[in-house]
């Protein structure tokens, strides 16, 4: 069951730079596409990159969870049933992604 907001809704105005539903986070690249392969480097370099990506994804998801929780607890969101429900759905999706990423991270540790 898909709980995404209708596309006709407009993002809330944000005078104090709080993230909105449709705001795009700044994603930093974890490695350059021009990187060369070092023959002296161990094969575990790819797992190091995966660990770094997992850390970045976890950090992003935790930031999103914190921001959504704060928005959900805001008095303006509590007064609007539709807005509150939308935030709850996004928060649940974020928590589900965090669990999936954690599960994948634990599985990659066991494959060493």
Image (cartoon, rainbow, N blue to C red):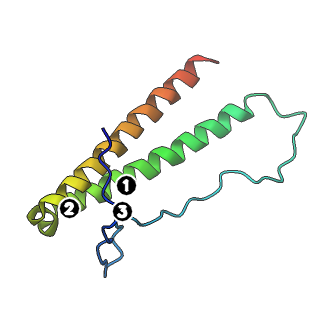
Q: Nearer the viewer, residue 90 or 110?
A: 90
Camera-near label (3 vs 2) is: 3
Within the image, what quadrant is residue 27 found in?
A: bottom right
Disc on res. 7: 3
The residue carrying mark 2 is 83
Quadrant location of the N terminus?
A: top left
Q: Are marks 2 and 1 in contact (CB under 8 Å)?
A: no
Question: At 66% from the left edge and 36% from the top edge, which residue is drawn?
Answer: 48
51 shown above or below 78: above
Q: Secondary structure at mark 1?
A: helix
Q: Secondary structure at mark 3?
A: loop
87 shown above or below 49: below
Q: Position of residue 72 (x, y in %)?
A: 20, 58
Quadrant location of the C terminus?
A: top right
Q: Is residue 13 left or right of residue 112?
A: left
The residue carrying mark 1 is 64
- Label 3 to label 2, Cα distance in Å? 13 Å
Name the residue furthest left.
Answer: 79
Within the image, what quadrant is residue 43 found in?
A: top right
Q: Is residue 66 left or right of residue 58?
A: left
102 shown above or below 80: above
Q: What crowding class fits label 3: few (fewer than 14 Cα within 10 Å), some (14-19), or many (20 or more)?
A: few
- Label 1 to label 3, Cα distance in Å? 21 Å
- Label 2 to label 1, Cα distance in Å? 16 Å
């Amino acid at each position: 069951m898909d709980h995404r907001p209708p596309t006709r809704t407009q993002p809330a105005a944000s005078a104090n730079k709080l993230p909105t539903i449709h705001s795009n986070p700044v994603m930093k690249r974890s490695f350059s596409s021009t990187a060369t392969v070092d023959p002296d480097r161990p094969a575990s370099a790819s797992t190091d990159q995966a660990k770094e990506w997992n850390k970045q994804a976890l950090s992003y998801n935790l930031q999103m969870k914190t921001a959504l929780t704060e928005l959900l607890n805001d008095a303006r969101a509590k007064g609007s049933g539709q807005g509150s429900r939308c935030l709850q759905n996004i928060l649940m999706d974020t928590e589900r992604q965090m669990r999936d990423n954690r599960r994948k991270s634990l599985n990659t540790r066991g494959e060493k």
